[in-house]
Image: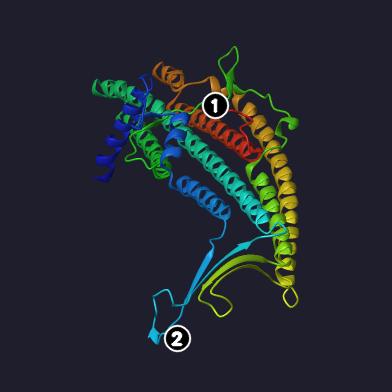
């Protein structure tokens, strides 16, 4: 009952999605039935929770930077005489009462404020670059997921083509069996072949819906009623075969602006400013103040100004300076290590891309590529081949097509890995 209910529904959804290939894509925030890479990226930037949270980290860093640029507030203190012995009045508010008002403002010296602001400015750059790298990595994950969905759709098309051909043969066989010109055993063998193909196709459809569900969660979509349109950098030769166009050289893969590596440089600058800040904090701190004392002991209305200067005798901030210096050295080592790892990674990705390209070209050169189920169907109906030869040819053609699709998928994944390792889309898969 499960198979009988869900198989037609799945098939109808796929056919409906295929029928939308030549329709005009929708615009705005509505979900199109055909989902292209550009449309998926647009939805990703609008809806993905991980990207939204990453942008909030930038807002937090900018808010801290704004706060660091503010001067500290002045401090005002009031002193009011409780008992006036001259008048014998408690809390004397008359002109004979005594009131003492003092205001104090701290003034940072020796770069104590400048280094703090520059440190937080470097942290804003770090948060911004980290967010860019997060967005880029998620976009590459989206490309991988779109590619997987697309090539699973291609695999289901292979089975659909064979199932349609087998169904056509079955119709002819059943007519011949009704007329007594063909054994019922041949019809049963063809029905068994169709059932096997339907079962294998359903396995790929299940995988397709699982990957579509992952895509739905990434893009925050409401349903799975969309069809993936995924371009790929193939070219067609005179015979119509598709081949990957190799236009890449190792020099094209040079890493010059990967956001995560630049973020580590910003983090190193922040650590350097923090070290200078801790060294500045070891120097004296200055506060200026003014005081007004009405009816004080010194004179009738006393007004004075002064300053407070800390003396770094016991605490010279040695611990914080040492900690900041160690952190600065650690970040520099981390940045150098990340650069080496990135160079090694991009070299591996480039070599893997070349291997996948060679594998795809070899797979596309196989002799069974030019065959089709229609060819085998004509040969069988004309009695040029036997049933066993027909089934063997079907299996061989299907395995060849699936192998080519896997090779294309592996090549596309290698392209995406190379784009991610380089920090820029060296090969634009959206063209």
Report the number of discs: 2
Quadrant of image for the C terminus? top right
Measuring 52% from the left and 36% from the top, which residue is drawn there? Answer: 143
| Residue 164 visible in the shown view | yes
Residue in front for this viewpoint, 395 or 64: 64
Whether residue 81 sits left or right of residue 256 in the image: it is left
Marks 2 and 1, the one that precedes in the sequence: 2
Residue in front for this viewpoint, 414 or 395: 414
Regarding mark 1 in the picture, which secondary structure is present there?
loop
Residue in front for this viewpoint, 226 or 290: 290
Answer above or below: position of 274 versus 427: below
Quarter occupied by residue 157: top left
Quadrant of image for the N terminus? top left
Q: Return the mark for residue 232.
A: 1
Residue in front for this viewpoint, 395 or 36: 36
Percent coordinates x, y for residue 67 in the rendering: 54, 54
Measuring 48% from the left and 49% from the top, which residue is drawn there? Answer: 56
């Amino acid at each position: 009952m499960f198979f009988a209910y869900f198989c037609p529904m799945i098939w109808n959804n796929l056919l409906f999605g295929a029928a939308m290939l030549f329709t005009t894509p929708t615009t705005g925030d509505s979900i199109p039935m055909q989902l292209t890479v550009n449309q998926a990226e647009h939805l990703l930037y609008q809806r993905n929770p991980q990207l939204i949270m990453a942008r909030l980290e930038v807002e937090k860093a900018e808010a801290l930077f704004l706060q660091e640029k503010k001067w500290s507030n002045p401090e005002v203190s009031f002193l009011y005489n409780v008992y006036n012995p001259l008048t014998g009045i408690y809390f004397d508010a008359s002109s004979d009462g005594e009131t003492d008002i003092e205001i104090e403002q701290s003034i940072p010296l020796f770069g104590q404020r400048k280094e703090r602001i520059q440190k937080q400015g470097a942290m804003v750059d770090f948060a911004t670059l980290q967010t860019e790298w997060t967005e880029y990595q998620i976009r590459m994950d989206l490309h991988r997921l779109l590619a997987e969905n697309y090539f699973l759709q291609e695999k289901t098309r292979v089975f659909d083509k064979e199932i349609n051909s087998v169904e056509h043969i079955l119709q002819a066989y059943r007519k011949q069996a009704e007329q007594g010109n063909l054994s019922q055993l041949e019809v049963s063998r063809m029905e068994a072949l169709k059932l096997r193909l339907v079962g294998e196709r359903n396995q790929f459809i299940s995988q397709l819906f699982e990957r579509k569900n992952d895509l739905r969660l990434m893009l925050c979509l409401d349903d799975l009623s969309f069809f993936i349109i995924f371009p790929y950098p193939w070219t067609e030769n005179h015979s119509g075969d598709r081949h990957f166009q190799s236009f890449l050289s190792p020099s094209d893969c040079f890493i010059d602006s990967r956001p995560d590596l630049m973020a580590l440089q910003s983090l190193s600058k922040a650590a350097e400013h923090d070290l200078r800040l801790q060294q500045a904090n070891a120097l004296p701190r200055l506060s200026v103040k003014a005081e007004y004392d009405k009816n004080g002991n010194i004179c009738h209305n006393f007004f004075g100004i002064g300053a407070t200067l800390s003396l770094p005798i016991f605490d010279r901030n040695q611990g914080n300076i040492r900690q900041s210096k160690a952190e600065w050295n650690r970040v520099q080592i981390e940045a150098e290590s990340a650069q080496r790892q990135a160079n090694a990674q991009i070299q591996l990705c480039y070599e893997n891309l070349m291997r996948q390209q060679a594998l795809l070209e070899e797979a596309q050169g196989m002799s069974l590529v030019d065959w089709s189920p229609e060819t085998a169907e004509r040969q069988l109906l004309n009695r040029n081949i036997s049933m066993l030869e027909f089934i063997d040819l079907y299996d061989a053609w299907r395995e060849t097509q699936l192998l080519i699709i896997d090779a294309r998928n592996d090549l596309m994944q290698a392209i995406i890995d190379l784009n991610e390792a380089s920090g820029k889309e060296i090969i634009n898969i959206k063209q």
